Structures are given as structure tokens and as C-alpha cells.
Image (cartoon, rainbow, N blue to C red):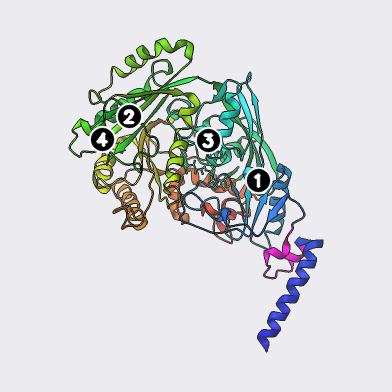
């Protein structure tokens, strides 16, 4: 009987709340009852809100975590985002609701998810305004880099720094760093932004740059979505080249490989390549290990298998030289001169020539291939690390030649970056050495019977062993696209940047509404925030 009364009372409360919500959601929340969020909809704002089809916003490329939000906002304007966040912020003393901007959902560990909160589908807000003479483009935070590239190329210009894969959102990569083979020269994408528009966790819209609201500007870049939602970014451009000479050479000696990579990234722009990357070949055949491109095709004069490397780990240095058609006659000579000082395995030079767009969009070609074989929507326990130069040889011995045990579960990137192309003031965290390496284990998991060594459990176990090795050997690594679940680990990750990070959080998102999927500020009392910010 008493249960029935409770249910009845609860039903009445909900009805009351539903009525109140139409008049004043804040009053409803202030009653301090356990609210059913759906009864508060629609909030007095904010564009199209969907409380039914929330499944997609509760998934991502990693395919490891699935937490559906209570609702998805498809904003029709920046004002919709401001209004939604303002509303959530006002509710926050009474009702703990979170908001995550979702770029293209290419996170690995649910970073763009908001369990029972609101996900903002940033792709609903489009806009690319190219200023070709001033060499910048103003783009909406939800635009994909592929669309930015298409729009800029029409005007003969292009961004300077990319990611390997372009179906990522501008706001999503700027919240991390945005790294690829151009970064040694131009810095990551966060070093190539002139201005941002950001809606903070209080729902206030700020325009910021290195000169104006500089603290917010730097905090938001690499800020893992913690300080605001990037609704617009001004991206630096350069004149776009027309064609690309793409070269790969092989090494069996890791030291020679890294020496040459470091040599190339330390040369002046005029006398080096435009893009430098590299990868490890622990098992040289198969779509899985080479999905980033089908470069080792039968058309190439030399096949890896003919190099008689006796099952050893190989390393591939990958470079490009950009050029315009009118100067095509110079390219062979230029490339030859740049290759001359390098110590790769003789006769292991693979070259190809293609349009600039085709090169930059190369991973998408591989995506389509994997999709057609049902190999794209599998779990991806990726591990991306930044390893100091001084420890990369030790890492090679222990990981590439040790823990990975000659089993490849996907491409293994390894290439160096120059620290001086990164702005110390951003939230991005990098190792201390002047040169550090990006190591990307881009792994795909399959059922253990179909692919021995590649089951999800085995790959997660390998990741943990790699991280344990780094910790125990004092490698000084930093995770890129970091994933931690305790405040203690985040503190270690951010190191000297942690107090500032916490201070900025208290200033711009004091109720810890934004990007909960990063799992950085999970304390419901937010005691850390208040403790570090007595002035607030
Ligand atoms: P999401 O996954 O949607 O979001 C990532 C985080 O940013 C979330 O916390 C989200 O809440 C927040 N966020 C999203 N939009 C905004 C916004 N507008 N304002 C504030 N916060 C926001 N990275 C590289 O650096 N280099 C690469 O070469 C590279 N290649 C990749 C290739 C593939 C196939 C994949 C799947 C990923 C790759 N990445 C690469 C990683 C990529 O940079 C991250 O996944 C990044 O999160 C961008 O993805 P997204 O736009 O889908 O962001």
C-alpha cells in the first residue's frame, strides 16, 4: 500500500514538475526533488532537441564505451548553444546535468559522451568563410577538416597543419592538438589558430586570441573541452600546392631511422621535406597493418618481402615534397638531394605522385576499404603516446621489439616533433625534451579465434603493459588524446600545468558541466575547484 502511495505521489510530483517546467524550470529544480530530466524539456531555448534518438551520441570510434545522453541538441545557431549552457548552469545548484560538444565522435574512450546529460551535435552548425588574401578562414567548430580543405582549395589556399585523417571536427582536434607530418614545421593545429569563439560553462560567449581574453584562448586549445565550446575558429592558411611527391624508404636499424628523421625535422624549410612521418612494420603484409594507405602496391618496383629482412622489425620513413605543376621538372632533383644524406636500406625507395587533396585525404580511401570488409566499426583500443627523444631507443627495444611480439594489430606510427613549434601557454601537455616522438598504436580488435593476439582483452592488456613499462622505466611519456580515470593520474599527466588547469576550470566552467566524458572533474562537490580558487 505504502509503495502505491509513493508511486502515486511521485507521479503527482512529476506532473507538477512538468507543468512547472513549462513556466519556470529553475523553480522546478529549486524544489530539490529528484527530477526526471525529460519532464524539464523543452528548456526555454535552444534549437531542435531530440530525447529519443540518442544512441549515436552515446557511441564513438573507440567502440569501447556507450553512454547515451538524455538528449541531443541540434543547434541552429550559436545562440542556441549559449542558451542551453546558461540553462544547465542555472540548474546546476539543484540538478547535476552535463553537456558535451560532439565533433564527429572519433574519440576512443567516450570523451564526447555525456551520460544522461546533453550532447550538442556540433555538425549542425556549419560555416566556412575563406579570406584568401589575408590567409585565414573563419570556420564553425563543428566543420570537418575535409570540408575546410575543399572550401579553401577552391580559393587556391589551404590550412598549414593537418591530421592524417580529415573526417575530424575543427573543435575536436583543437581540443586535443591536431598532429600530423606537417607539425614538425608548422606546429600542431593548435599552433595555427588566430582566434576562437568560445561558449563557456556559464553560457557566456567570448571571442579570444593571443591578444584578447588570452587566458581563455590558451586554455581552450588542447583543453579537452573543459573550458568552453569552440563555436568558431580562425585558421591560418597558406597558398596550396598542386601536387605531392610521396616517398617511403625502409630501415632495419632503429637508430639510423630516428637519426634521419631528426635530421630532416631540424633542417630549414627550404631544404627539407614538407611532411615527415614514419611507422613500424612488425608484420609487413595485410590490410590491417597498412590500412592508412595501400602504398606498397604491386606497381612499386620493390616489395618489402624481397628485402630479405628475416622477420626483423622494419621502420619506414615517410616524406612528401609539395610542388606546383609548373615546377614539376625540378622535383626529381630536389628530392634526390634531400634523400642523399639519409641511410636507408639501399633499393628500398618507394615513390608515388599525386594531387594535394588526394594525398591529404589518403586515410579516407583506406577507411572505405576497411568499411567494405566490415573492419571499421570494431573496437579500437588505441594508445597514443608522446615519448621524449632521449628515451625513444629504450622504448623501441622494450615495446616494438618486445611487448608487441611481432604481432601487428594496426598501424604503428612513430615520428618526431619539434617542441619549439608548440605554444607552452596552451593546455596541451608534451614531454620536456626539445624533440619528442608521437607513437600511435592504432589498433583494431577482433574476436580472438579469427585473429590470434588481436582480441580486445589482449590489446588492452598490451596497452597496460606498455604504460607500466613507461612508468617503471621513467620514460617521461605523455599520453596524447589522454585517458585517465582518477584525479591523481590527471595531476601527474598535467604536471606543472595542473594548478592553472584547475584555476581555469573554476573560472570558466565552475559547475563542471562541460565534456564529462574526459573524466577529469568528477567530484560532485567540486572541492578541488573551489579549493584552488578562493577568489571565486
Ligand atoms: P570528438 O570525439 O567528437 O570530441 C573530442 C573531445 O573534444 C570531446 O571531449 C568533446 O566534448 C570535445 N569537443 C568536440 N568538439 C568541441 C568543440 N567544438 N568545442 C569544445 N570541445 C569540443 N588526431 C591527430 O591529432 N592526428 C591524427 O592524424 C589523427 N588521426 C585520426 C584518425 C582516425 C581514424 C581517428 C578516429 C582519430 C584520429 N585522430 C587524430 C584523433 C582525433 O584528433 C580525436 O579523435 C579528436 O577527438 C577529434 O575527433 P572529433 O572531431 O570526432 O572529436
Residue 530 point in image, percent of width and height = 60, 55
In the rendered structure, does residue 480 fall within the stretch colored magenta?
no
Q: The residue tagged with tag 4: helix, strand or loop? A: strand
The image's mark for residue 314 is 4
Magenta stretch in the rendered image: 27-42
Give whichever of discs 2 and 3 has the lower sequence position: 2
User: What's the mark number on residue 200?
Assistant: 1
Q: Is tag 3's residue or tag 1's residue first in the polypeptide sequence?
A: 1
Reading the image, the residue beneath label 3 is 425
Q: CA distance from mark 1 to mark 4?
A: 47 Å
Tell me the number on the disc at residue 433.
Answer: none
Label 1 secondary element? strand
**Residue 6 against residue 448 in the figure, above or below:** below
State the residue in front, 450 or 348. 450
| Residue closest to the eye, 5 or 389 | 5
Query: Residue at the location (59% across, 45% down)?
Result: 504
Residue at position x 39%, y 44% in the image: 442
Amino acid at each position: 500500500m505504502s509503495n502505491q502511495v509513493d508511486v502515486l505521489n511521485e507521479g503527482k510530483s512529476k506532473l507538477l514538475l512538468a507543468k512547472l517546467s513549462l513556466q519556470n524550470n529553475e523553480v522546478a529544480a529549486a524544489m530539490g526533488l529528484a527530477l526526471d530530466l525529460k519532464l524539464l524539456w523543452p528548456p526555454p531555448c535552444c534549437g531542435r532537441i531530440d530525447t529519443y534518438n540518442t544512441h549515436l551520441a552515446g557511441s564513438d570510434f573507440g567502440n569501447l564505451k556507450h553512454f547515451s545522453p538524455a538528449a541531443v541538441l541540434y543547434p541552429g545557431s550559436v545562440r542556441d548553444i549559449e542558451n542551453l549552457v546558461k540553462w544547465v548552469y542555472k540548474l546546476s545548484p539543484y540538478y547535476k546535468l552535463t553537456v558535451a560538444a560532439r565533433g564527429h565522435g572519433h574519440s576512443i574512450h567516450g570523451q564526447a559522451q555525456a551520460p544522461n546529460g546533453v550532447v550538442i551535435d556540433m555538425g549542425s552548425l556549419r560555416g566556412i568563410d575563406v579570406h584568401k588574401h589575408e590567409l585565414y578562414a573563419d570556420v564553425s567548430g563543428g566543420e570537418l577538416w575535409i570540408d575546410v580543405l575543399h572550401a579553401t582549395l577552391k580559393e587556391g589556399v589551404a590550412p598549414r597543419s593537418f591530421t592524417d585523417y580529415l573526417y575530424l571536427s575543427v573543435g575536436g582536434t583543437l581540443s586535443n592538438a591536431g598532429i600530423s607530418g606537417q607539425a614538425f614545421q608548422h606546429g600542431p593545429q593548435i599552433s595555427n589558430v588566430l582566434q576562437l569563439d568560445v561558449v563557456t560553462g556559464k553560457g557566456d560567449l567570448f571571442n579570444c586570441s593571443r591578444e584578447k581574453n588570452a587566458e581563455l584562448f590558451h586554455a581552450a586549445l588542447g583543453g579537452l573541452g573543459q573550458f568552453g565550446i569552440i563555436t568558431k575558429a580562425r585558421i591560418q592558411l597558406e597558398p596550396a600546392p598542386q601536387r605531392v611527391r610521396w616517398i617511403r624508404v625502409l630501415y632495419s636499424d632503429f637508430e639510423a631511422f630516428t637519426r634521419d628523421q631528426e635530421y630532416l625535422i631540424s633542417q630549414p624549410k627550404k631544404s627539407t621535406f614538407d611532411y615527415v612521418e614514419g611507422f613500424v612494420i612488425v608484420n609487413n603484409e595485410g590490410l590491417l597493418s597498412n590500412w592508412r594507405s595501400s602504398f606498397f602496391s604491386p606497381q612499386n618496383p620493390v616489395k618489402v618481402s624481397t628485402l630479405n629482412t628475416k622477420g626483423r622489425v622494419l621502420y619506414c620513413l615517410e616524406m612528401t615534397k609539395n610542388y606546383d605543376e609548373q615546377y614539376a621538372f625540378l622535383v626529381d632533383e630536389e628530392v634526390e638531394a634531400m634523400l642523399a644524406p639519409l641511410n636507408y636500406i639501399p633499393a628500398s625507395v618507394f615513390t608515388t605522385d599525386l594531387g594535394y587533396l588526394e594525398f591529404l585525404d589518403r586515410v579516407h580511401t583506406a577507411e572505405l576499404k576497411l568499411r567494405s570488409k566490415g573492419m571499421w566499426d570494431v573496437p579500437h583500443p588505441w594508445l597514443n603516446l608522446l615519448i621524449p627523444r632521449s628515451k625513444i631507443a629504450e622504448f623501441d627495444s622494450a615495446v616494438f621489439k618486445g611487448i608487441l611480439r611481432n604481432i601487428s594489430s594496426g598501424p604503428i606510427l612513430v615520428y618526431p616533433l619539434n617542441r619549439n613549434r608548440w605554444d607552452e601557454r596552451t593546455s596541451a601537455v608534451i614531454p620536456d625534451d626539445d624533440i619528442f616522438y608521437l607513437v600511435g598504436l592504432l589498433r583494431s580488435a577482433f574476436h580472438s579465434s579469427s585473429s590470434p593476439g588481436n582480441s580486445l582483452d589482449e590489446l588492452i592488456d598490451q596497452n597496460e603493459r606498455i604504460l607500466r613499462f613507461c612508468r617503471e622505466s621513467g620514460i617521461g611519456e605523455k599520453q596524447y588524446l589522454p585517458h585517465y580515470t582518477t584525479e591523481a593520474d590527471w595531476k601527474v599527466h598535467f604536471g606543472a600545468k595542473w594548478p592553472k588547469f584547475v584555476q581555469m576550470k573554476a573560472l570558466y566552467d565552475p559547475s563542471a558541466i562541460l565534456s564529462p566524458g574526459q573524466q577529469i572533474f568528477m567530484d560532485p562537490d567540486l572541492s578541488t575547484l573551489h579549493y584552488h580558487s578562493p577568489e571565486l
